[in-house]
Amino acid sequence: MKRIAAEPYRDIDFSRATRGPVIAPEPGKTKISIRIDNAVIEYFKAQVERAGSGNYQTLMNDALAAYIQQLSVIDAVRQVVREELAAPGSKGRAARTRAVTA
């Protein structure tokens, strides 16, 4: 095996250098630090392991995004039901109950 020599010391000028990540962050994403229960992390890591590849953090992000989507769909359905019940000509709750029991 060929031996690799260490690079000699170089005097590098960092006076015009800027701090920050070398790789620009992905647009639309924010890096945060949160505490999550071990059981939750283990669950998502197990899901990735079963799939054979992937990233548990991406899976967690996808699960949270799906939850938000589900909530917005449920809110939309509730709004439609409220509008239908409040529409002129629709029978009120009491009238429907009497019609069902009669």
Image (cartoon, grey):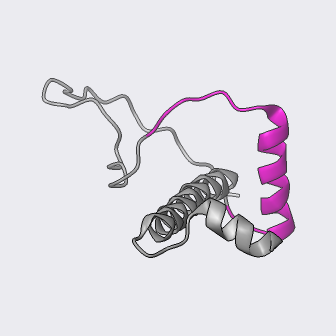
Residue 88 position (above or below residue 5) = below
Q: Which of 19 and 62 is in front in this view?
A: 62
Q: Report how many numbered discs are placed on residues in the image.
A: 0
Q: Position of residue 81 (x, y in %)?
A: 53, 67
| x, y percent for residue 26 | 37, 54
In-image side of 100 versus 5 (left or right): right
**Which quadrant of the rendered structure holds the N terminus?**
bottom right
- Whether residue 53 is in magenta: the answer is yes
x then y, percent, for residue 101: 82, 70
Residue shown at 43% from the left, 38% from the top: 7
Tell me which corner region of the image, top left, top right, bottom left or bottom right, holds residue 53: bottom right
Residue 98 position, x and y percent, is 73, 67
- Residue at image x 85%, y 38%? 39
Q: Which residue lies furthest to the left in this view?
A: 16
Quadrant hosting residue 19 = top left
State which region is magenta: 31-54
